[in-house]
Amino acid sequence: MVSPAKADRALRRLVADLAALHRDDAGAILEALSGPERRAVEALLEGFGAPSALPVEPKAFDRSALSPWLVQLIDALPADRMTSAAHETLIACAVDVFPLRSGKDRARAVTP
């Protein structure tokens, strides 16, 4: 039988490994769990200080404010031109610098 201390250490290691995964990967793992299991693991992740693995509503930015070549780069699949992390950073910067200001801007928006 496994001692409670060893089981606790193993659980903490698993939560640390899950927290280190990309949000999409962690989300796929969490989706496979039942409701109570998922809530328990998400509570452990929050206690671990990990960002939520739940999907985040995409933010839009004004694509007309960007150069056409940059819009093409953003529209391309990340694997085609850059790493996923670089692609996410590029989109986050565009959202920060060129956020949508009104409902009229929605027609010119990009939602990654």
Image: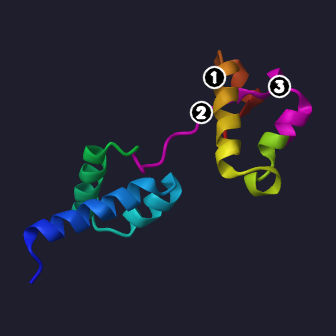
Q: Give the range drawn in magenta.
A: 52-72
Spatial CA distance of label 2 from label 3 is 16 Å
Q: Classify the position of the N terminus by image quarter.
A: bottom left
The amino acid sitting under disc 1 is Asp
- Between circles 2 and 3, the one closer to the viewer is 3
Whether residue 86 is situated above or below residue 108 in the rendered picture: below
Q: Give residue 59's position: percent from left, percent from top.
A: 59, 33
- Between circles 2 and 1, the one closer to the viewer is 1
Determine if residue 99 is in view. no
Magenta-colored stretch includes residue 110: no
Give neighbour class at mark 1: few <14, some 14-19, many 20+ (Cα, 10 Å).
few
Secondary structure of residue under mark 2: loop
Q: Determine which quarter of the picture holds residue 15.
A: bottom left
Disc marking residue 56: none
Q: Classify the position of the C terminus by image quarter.
A: top right
Check the image and name the residue furthest to the top.
101
Q: Which of marks 2 and 3 is nearer the N terminus?
A: 2
Residue at 49%, 52% (x, y): give it: 23
